[in-house]
């Protein structure tokens, strides 16, 4: 049995490691559109999500384009930081195509939630009908949900101070979004947050045999890839491991 000596030096890494392709281009697209918005403020009226424009005027691009606009530097900074922190690891596990599908589904799903809620006959929802919603928060909340499902005990800093297991972190922010949505405080984006969570869960629920089977499949695939890299095992060599996994 081979033995391994102790490493001669200890290395530390900040964040999830090297950026992945989809996350990189999502961040670049958001930064470019943020600069465009600073130069031309009225672009929000065309590309932001305004339910009345989607329903009455047929501006069907808004449920997609609103994800690439942000209000101020802190808004885009925190959203892009979150997409990098949680998206990189998920993209490595899922692969770029699945990651992009999930990101799109949760972002557009958050927009659909906002539009549907704006049609409800309640005082705290009617004002949303003519108000613009912008930002990638809905898609980010979807990534947070997926991260918590795959890594439920992984600590996340609440308020950048207190470490909280991922599953409880998502429960807390989901409850806060629901509370703020009902109370009508903190703007209109809380319904988008809830939509990102709900559509993210529904999308994973529809995976191979349901949510549990999807998570097990993706986690097993991720573990196998890590073991391959660790022991330098490649397809076509002496190992036939992958052939026996169905």
Image (cartoon, grey):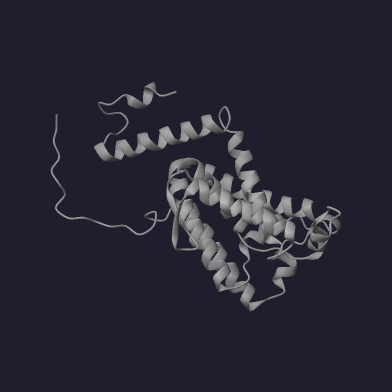
Residue 195, given in percent of the width and then of the height, sits at 67, 50
The residue positioned 65% from the left and 45% from the top of the image is 198
**Residue at the extreme bottom of the image, as rendered:** 39
Q: Is residue 124 visible?
A: yes
Residue 93: which quarter of the image?
A: top left
Q: Is residue 143 visible?
A: no
Residue 131: which quarter of the image?
A: bottom right
Residue 199, given in percent of the width and then of the height, sits at 65, 44
User: Where the N terminus falls, by quadrant?
Assistant: top left
101 lies above or below 36: above
Residue 86, given in percent of the width and then of the height, sits at 47, 52
**Residue at the extreme top of the image, as rendered:** 244
The residue positioned 39% from the left and 54% from the top of the image is 16
User: Where the C terminus falls, by quadrant?
Assistant: top left
The residue positioned 62% from the left and 76% from the top of the image is 38
98 lies above or below 183: above
Horizontally, residue 173 falls left or right of residue 2, namely right
The residue positioned 46% from the left and 35% from the top of the image is 218
Q: Residue 41 or 135: which is nearer the viewer?
A: 135
236 lies above or below 68: above
């Amino acid at each position: 049995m081979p033995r391994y000596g102790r490493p001669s030096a200890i290395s530390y890494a900040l964040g999830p490691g090297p950026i992945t392709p989809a996350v990189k281009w999502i961040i670049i697209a958001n930064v470019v559109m943020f600069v465009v918005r600073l130069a031309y403020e009225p672009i929000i009226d065309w590309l932001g999500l305004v339910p009345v424009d989607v329903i009455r005027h047929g501006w069907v691009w808004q449920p997609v384009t609103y994800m690439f606009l942000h209000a101020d530097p802190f808004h885009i900074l925190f959203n892009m930081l979150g997409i990098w922190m949680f998206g990189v690891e998920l993209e490595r596990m899922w692969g770029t195509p699945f990651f992009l599908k999930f990101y799109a589904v949760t972002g557009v799903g958050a927009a659909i939630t906002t539009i549907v809620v704006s049609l409800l006959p309640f005082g705290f929802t009617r004002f949303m009908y003519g108000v613009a919603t912008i930002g990638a928060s809905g898609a980010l909340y979807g990534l947070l949900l997926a991260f918590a499902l795959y890594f439920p005990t992984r600590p996340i800093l609440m308020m950048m101070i207190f470490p909280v297991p991922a599953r409880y972190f998502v429960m807390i922010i989901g409850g806060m979004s629901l509370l703020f949505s009902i109370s009508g405080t903190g703007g209109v984006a809380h319904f988008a947050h809830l939509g990102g969570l709900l559509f993210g869960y529904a999308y994973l629920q529809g995976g191979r045999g349901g949510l549990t089977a999807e998570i097990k499949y993706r986690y097993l695939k991720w573990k196998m890839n890590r073991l391959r890299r660790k022991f330098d095992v490649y397809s076509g060599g002496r190992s036939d491991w992958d052939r026996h996994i169905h």
